[in-house]
Image: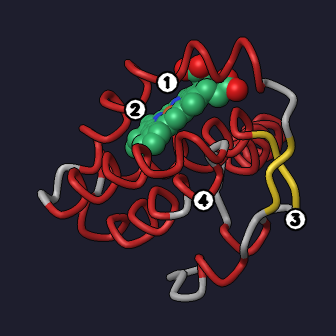
């Protein structure tokens, strides 16, 4: 009986640890790094497991990324995202953008705060 209880508590804890990217919980301001890690990457994993159920959420998150760029990169980020989403290859956008921009962004803008435009997530499935 005791064992069952301990097991039950263990699994409850485990279930609570599962990372969830609830778009409603997007903070008003966030660094690009945390947006990527706490939202884009979490939904990417869900998307890999179940593309149909998570495609809309991943697309919403990616569509918002160009608006987060520094002014001089906005156009190119927009092009990358538009291209790969229109080809229905969202995961290709990660590679394309990271290869070209990640290192420099990280070195220079790691702490830059981005304001989240809630309107970009209006059709959120959760
Ligand atoms: C248009 C640009 C762009 C797109 C598209 C993009 N990212 Fe990023 N991502 C960045 C930049 C820039 C950084 C660096 C941010 C920093 O470290 O300050 C980054 C950082 C990250 C990080 C932080 C950890 C690390 O590797 O340094 C993760 C995780 C990540 N991205 C996941 C993804 C995934 C998964 C996708 C696609 C589903 C994606 N990103 C699409 C630009 C992009």
CB within 8 Å, label 4 to label 3: no
Distance, label 2 to label 1, CA atoms, is 6 Å
| Residue designated by label 2 | 97
Give the crowd class for mark 4: few <14, some 14-19, many >=20 residues within 10 Å: some
> Gap in Å between the C-alphas at discs 4 and 3?
14 Å
Q: How many marks?
A: 4
Name the residue tied to disc 3: 28
* Residue at the extreme left of the image, as rendered: 87
Q: CA distance from mark 2 to mark 3?
A: 24 Å
Q: Nearer the viewer, mark 3 or mark 1?
A: 1
Question: Cβ(mark 1) to ligand 1 < 8 Å?
Answer: yes
Please state the horizontal and vertical placement of residue 66, each as a whole percent of the image. Answer: 52, 54
Callout 2–callout 1 Cβ contact below 8 Å = yes
- For this rendering, which residue is in front, 84 or 34? 84
Residue under the point 72% across and 78% down: 118
Image quadrant holding the C terminus, namely bottom right
- Where residue 9 sits, quadrant-wise, is top right
Choose between 44 and 82: the one closer to the eye.
82
Q: Earlier in the sequence, mark 2 or mark 3?
A: 3
Q: Is residue 95 above or below residue 72?
A: above
The residue wearing badge 1 is: 101
Q: CA distance from mark 1 to mark 4?
A: 15 Å
Element under disc 1: helix
Disc number for residue 87: none
Question: How far apart are the alpha carbons under marks 3 and 1?
Answer: 24 Å
**Secondary element type, mark 3:** loop
């Amino acid at each position: 009986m005791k064992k069952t209880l301990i097991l039950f508590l263990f699994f409850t804890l485990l279930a609570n640890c599962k990372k969830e990217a609830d778009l409603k919980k997007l903070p008003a301001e966030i660094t690009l790094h945390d947006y990527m890690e706490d939202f884009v990457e979490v939904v990417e994993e869900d998307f890999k497991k179940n593309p149909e159920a998570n495609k809309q959420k991943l697309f919403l998150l990616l569509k918002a990324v160009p608006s987060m760029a520094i002014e001089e990169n906005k156009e190119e980020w927009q092009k990358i995202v538009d291209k790969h989403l229109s080809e229905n290859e969202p995961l290709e956008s990660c590679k394309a953008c990271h290869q070209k921009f990640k290192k420099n962004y990280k070195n220079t803008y790691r702490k830059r705060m981005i304001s989240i435009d809630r309107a970009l997530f209006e059709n959120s499935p959760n």
